[in-house]
Amino acid sequence: MKFQDKAAQAFPIFVLDRIYEEPANFCYGLAKLCRERCTVGIPSDGEPAGGGLRSDDGFLDQEAAAPLRTMIAEAVAIYHKNAAPRIYDAPSAVRGFALKGRAYIQRGQQSFRSAFDSSSLYAGTFSVAVPSHIVQNEAEGGHVMLENPLPQDVRRRAGMVLKPSFQIRAEQGLLLVFPAFLSMDVSRFSGGAERIAVVFEASPQT
């Protein structure tokens, strides 16, 4: 398990990469589940859905998604322990988290944005399947872009060393956790292959 804490240089964010010894096999099963459960068309910047699909908010509640749910719960707990004191006033008041998540199937030339519930403390995404040409060439698009809506003077007063935006190149088996006050965009990419991801939120239980 590898942790990268990029809070000092950009955002409070953890990258948990290659958690399983055989992430490709783990992701293969998840991709199959996502294709079964994604039945709702998703718009792209106000445009027609264009073939993109999503599941409902209960994706992580399925028995077949239990290993992913466990992984996310552990990542959120670790992230909260390490990052919360730098972000929130009273992190010790949180005793646990309620998770919800959706699966998304995105196709080339389609982008989408995720804005998270105000009741959520953290959010994140797990890359289930990423077209190889995106991983190999940054110019192909399909990246995750996190944006901070807080004005610079507010961030400075709060002691946050955060850039207004931060881009992460997606690859299969990559799990990102970040504060839910950020918005997340996934850019368009070339070609018609599928990019599959699970987007989740963690609401505090006190």
Image (cartoon, rainbow, N blue to C red):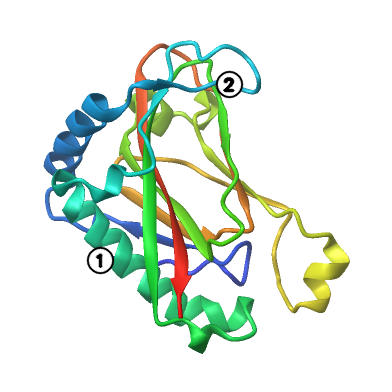
Label 1 sits on residue: 1
* Number of residues whose C-alpha sits closer than 10 Å to that of mark 2, classed few (under 14), some (14–19) or many (20 or more): some
Q: Secondary structure at mark 2?
A: loop
Counting from the top left corner in percent of width and height, residue 50 is at: 49, 11
- Residue at 18% x, 29% y is 32
Among numbered discs 1 and 2, the one appearing first in the sequence: 1
| Foreground pick, 46 / 182 | 46
- Residue at 37% x, 75% y is 78
184 relative to 36 in the view: left or right: right
- Residue at 49% x, 23% y is 42
Q: Amino acid at mark 2?
A: Ser
Choose mark 1 or mark 2, whichever is in front: 2
Q: Secondary structure at mark 1?
A: loop
Label 2 sits on residue: 44
- Residue at 35% x, 16% y is 193
Counting from the top left corner in percent of width and height, residue 173 is at: 28, 46
Q: Amino acid at mark 1?
A: Met
The quadrant where residue 181 appears: bottom right
| Foreground pick, 197 / 57 | 57
Can residue 187 be seen here? The reply is no
